[in-house]
Image: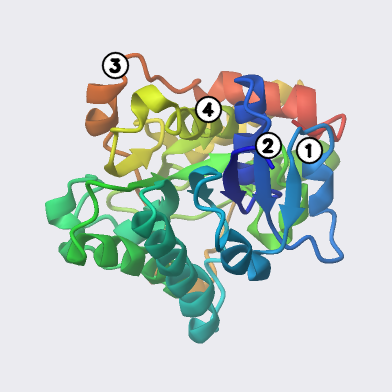
Amino acid sequence: MKPFVVVTGAAGMIGSGVVRALNDCGVTDLLLVDDLKQGQKWKNLVGKQFSSLISKRSLLSFLQGKQDLVQAIIHLGACSSTIEIDADYLWENNTRYTISLAEWALTHGKRFVYASSAATYGDGSCGFDDNHDALSTLRPLNMYGYSKHAVDLWMKKENVLHLVCGLKYFNVFGPNEYHKGPMASMVMKMCHKAHTEGRIGLFRSNDPARFKDGDQVRDFIYIKDAASWTACLIDPKWRHVCGIYNIGSGQTTTWNRLALALFQALGRAPTIEYIPMPEALTNQYQNYTCASMEKLRKIFPDVRAMNVEHSIADYVTNYLLPQAYW
């Protein structure tokens, strides 16, 4: 058996994108970890090169005695539903599993890159700075965010942040998210509505004094950027890069701008309707997110994300309309 890189959550949107980015760099000795079940997620792996695929339930036992073969672990697998209410499940699946895998990697001196989330920042009142000293001040708004935040806090408490690399992904969108259903990006959902109905519905502002309707802000990052930045972190020359880093564009995009970019990509005249925000969302809705990217750019000065108009044009034209995969 050849030495291999482990990628968990490998059939997901970000996971399959990272596999693609690794393949593009010539890395094909990959142990992919995911539970495909009965959905269409398997289609994200078609055309990818890898050595083997196993269930996440089998990974820790599979790794026993194979420490000399593992080159690195990129842990992206998790339940990413922000509306999941089974806190016990999220704790076991997202928090405990990540810690167990990290403990194995740290015990054997293996590179460990894991997915945190921008959801750890909560309403953003404490900012979006990936400074380790600010971790204890963050207050996630949902259990998904807390399950990720708990891992970051564990890493800090155990004093191992200088040995691992945690990535706080912001609003990632792009190809290979067809399987995500309700948790697919708003870019995909809005594109479908604009294409089939000729209109897009945006939430009215719940804070009109600060944000007009549709002018609520997000930091959108295209999957091709997020995947390539993640994949490069297991390159031997970057393995010294440790700690927690934001993975975002560092730019603000309003929902109105996003909607106009979608209509432009579709070649249709824009029609935007403003609809009431569901009451259940009002108290946990983020009106503003923007990743602080200074920390990552100190290491990678040339890191720049594709702008939203170009990334949406690529996504719509080359993937959504032809229903293609990346």
What is the distance, in whole Å, between disc 2 and disc 1 at their CAs? 7 Å
Are there few (<14), some (14-19), or many (20+) residues within 10 Å of tag 1?
some
Q: Which colour scheme is used?
A: rainbow
Residue 46 in which image quadrant: top right
Q: Residue 91, relative to residue 179: is it above or below?
A: below
Q: Of marks 3 and 4, which one's residue comes earlier in the chain?
A: 4
Helix, strand or loop at label 3? It is loop
Disc 3 vs disc 2: Cβ atoms closer than 8 Å? no
| Residue 234 percent coordinates (x, y) | 45, 33
* Residue wearing tag 3: 301
Residue 255 visible? The answer is: yes
Q: Of marks 3 and 2, which one's residue comes earlier in the chain?
A: 2
Q: Of marks 1 and 4, which one's residue comes earlier in the chain?
A: 1
* Residue wearing tag 1: 198
What is the distance, in whole Å, between disc 1 and disc 3 at their CAs? 41 Å
Residue 36 in which image quadrant: bottom right
Q: Residue at x 74, y 30 (%)?
A: 326
Q: In this view, does 166 lie to the left or right of 173?
A: left
Helix, strand or loop at label 1? It is loop
Helix, strand or loop at label 2? It is loop
Q: Residue 94, relative to residue 128: is it above or below?
A: below
Residue 241 in which image quadrant: top left
Front label number (4 vs 2): 4
**Amino acid on which the number 4 mark rests in the picture:** Ser
* Residue wearing tag 2: 271
Front label number (3 vs 2): 3
Helix, strand or loop at label 4? It is helix
Q: Is residue 164 left or right of residue 175?
A: left
- In the rendering, which numbered label is found on residue 228? 4
Front label number (1 vs 3): 3
| Residue 65 percent coordinates (x, y) | 55, 60
